[in-house]
Image (cartoon, grey):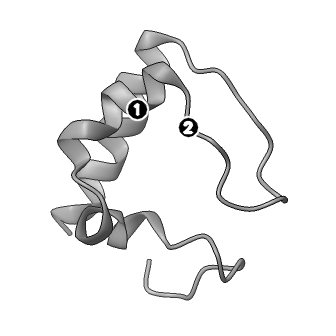
Amino acid sequence: MNGESTHPDAPPFRTLSSRYPIEDLEEALGEGISTGHPDMPEFVATPSQIDAIVSYIKSLNRR
């Protein structure tokens, strides 16, 4: 939970809220997010997967 990201262009999820409003993440995931680096594959998430992703990222901020 406190290590560095294995990819320099991919910040750890636990710091995401300091760089991006988590409240906006659900909409962005629903519309599709362009990958931030070439190692990240494109994916399409279902609404329930989006809810789970956002809940997980929010849970990291409480630790």
Residue 24 occupies quadrant: top left
Residue drawn at 29 percent across, 61 percent down: 60
Secondary structure type for disc 2: loop
The CA span between labels 2 and 1 is: 6 Å
Left or right: 61 as drawn, with respect to 41: left
Q: Nearer the viewer, residue 21 or 13?
A: 21
Image coordinates of residue 37 in percent, x first then y, are 74, 62
Left or right: 56 as drawn, with respect to 33: left
Image coordinates of residue 2 in percent, x first then y, are 43, 86
Q: Earlier in the sequence, mark 2 or mark 1?
A: 1
Residue drawn at 66 percent across, 83 percent down: 8
Disc 2 residue type?
Ile
Is residue 38 placed above or below 56 in the rendered structure? below
The quadrant of the image that shows the N terminus is bottom left
- All told, the count of numbered labels is 2
Name the residue beneath numbered marker 2.
Answer: 33
The quadrant of the image that shows the C terminus is bottom left
Name the residue beneath numbered marker 1.
Answer: 28
Image coordinates of residue 19 in percent, x first then y, are 31, 68
Mark 1: few/some/many CA within 10 Å (<14, 14-19, 20+): few
